[in-house]
Image (cartoon, grey):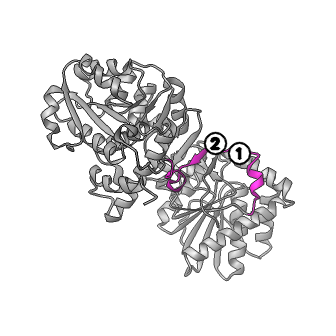
Amino acid sequence: MTDLPIALYFAKDVKAIDSLALTHISITGYQLMTRAAQSALIVLQERWPNAKTLAVLCGPGNNGGDGLVLARLAKAQGLSVNVYSVGEFSENASPEAKQARSDWLATDDEIIQFRGQAIQADVVVDALLGTGSHFPIQAHFQDAIKTINNSKCPVLSIDLPSGLNADTGAYEDAVKADVTLTFVAMKIGLIMGNALDVVGELVFDNLGVSASIFTQIKPCAWRIEYSDVCHALKPRRLSQHKGDNGHLCIIGGGQTGYSGAVCLAGESALRAGAGLVSAVVAKDSLMLLARAPAELMCYGLNHPKEMQTLLMAATVVILGPGLSQNSWGKKFFQFSVNSNKPMIVDADGLNWLAKYPQKRENWILTPHPGEAARLLNVSTKEIQQDRVSAAKALKQKYGGVIVLKGAGTIVVAENGDLAINGGGFPALATGGTGDILAGLMGSLVAQKLSLSSAATLAVSVHTAAAALESTMGERGMLASDLFLHIRNLLNPQQ
């Protein structure tokens, strides 16, 4: 087993890597299958050392072949193993799957035809469907998936939980695994969206495939790791002054009750190191900013032309926190987007953009799935069914850098490259965390990071801060609890 790699691949690319490996390292398909089964046995013994009985549910393909070889190896280790076949075994099966079946039967044990019977064992192995699954999945596989989930037994899924789309992370019915052991290359669908609810602990083994093989197939995306991006901000010069660290202008707080979003974005920007931060709100909201940090310069304005001088002085603009969808919000949105300033557009700024779409390259758009649905005029379900395609469509329509928030936040860079912040942090599911993310991004752009670098670093720091704060529990975290961690994470040299 090895650390999770940062390169991510679609299923078709993993298949191509498999083929290259078989060609270049003089190994047979069955030997590679045996390596996978040996790896699975190690994981099984490490995670469940007291297991004595094993139920292995096998499909007719190579994923089922992995399961059959695992069953044979586990039996040789003294475990009591029952193998269940789901679906009809075909003479068109791969040579590897045929050999795995033959070798299991040679142990004088049987293959039980699965017909919906209850399954009970110390551990259930899901070897039903691999990366080549076709959707929607057939009824007998759906029945097997439900049986596994209803068994309440610990589950080890081979390569990916059966029923999960390896490219999108979407599913209708999927095995809920305790551990998923994936092979050769990381499938992009394992680390985003609803996949996080069924993958469990994710373990990786490249099965000895040489690194040189991977240079021939370009990843479809990269996984964001804090350790890889945390040094994007360089240590400051001893002579540095506030003007060197940029002036950020936040436009929002368009009605009573919405000013908290501006406060959070403003303090986030200050904690992330912006030299100056100004906030423009509706005049009626100004007194509500009394709780804002003293360092936040606040302006209550009724007409957008009143902020012309402020906009000219700003390095970057955040448009949207608490902006509102009233007439004030509309006026200030339209005036702001017509400026040529680099911009982070969030919250109601995105809702106005959906009504008055335009494309430009010097902004970052930060929609959650509902806002993304409005921007693309589709349903939220459609966004979640294929988050990568949705993020690409947003980039195509609106330009700039796209940050599609959610479990496994996706960043589409200026050049179209994709990065994914794998994992989910339920503690972030509370009001105000999006405002803090926007403030982070704006602050980093003000400090002269590129839009793509600012988006990637902000997303990474945001979730790393949530992970640190979650040590006290995932319920009850306030968005403002992230501030201390943000400052620490943006000063890694300390």
Looking at the image, which is closer to me, 286 or 478? 286
Q: Left or right: where does residue 407 sit relative to residue 94?
A: left
Residue visible at 56% across and 52% down in the picture: 190
Labelled pair 1, 2 in contact (Cβ < 8 Å): yes
463 is higher (above) or lower (below) than 319: below
Residue visible at 70% across and 67% down in the picture: 37
Q: Residues within 10 Å of mark 1 (few under 14, many from 20)?
A: some
Q: Position of residue 349 (x, y in %)?
A: 34, 28
Q: Residues within 10 Å of mark 2 (few under 14, many from 20)?
A: some
The answer to whether residue 452 is magenta is no
* Image depth: mark 1 or mark 2 in front: 2
Residue visible at 17% across and 35% down in the picture: 257
- Amino acid type at circle 2 is Cys
- Amino acid type at circle 1 is Asp
Q: Left or right: where does residue 198 sit relative to residue 141?
A: left
Looking at the image, which is closer to me, 394 or 298? 298
The reply to whether residue 270 is visible in this rendering is: yes
Residue visible at 53% across and 50% down in the picture: 224
- How far separated are the C-alphas under marks 1 and 2? 9 Å
Q: Quadrant of residue 414?
A: top right
Q: Position of residue 9 (x, y in %)?
A: 65, 47
How many numbered discs sit on the rendered protein? 2
Mark 2 highlights which residue?
220
Q: Position of residue 46 (x, y in %)?
A: 58, 76
226 is higher (above) or lower (below) than 245: below
The magenta segment: 208-232
Under circle 2, the secondary element is loop
- Give residue 13's mark: 1
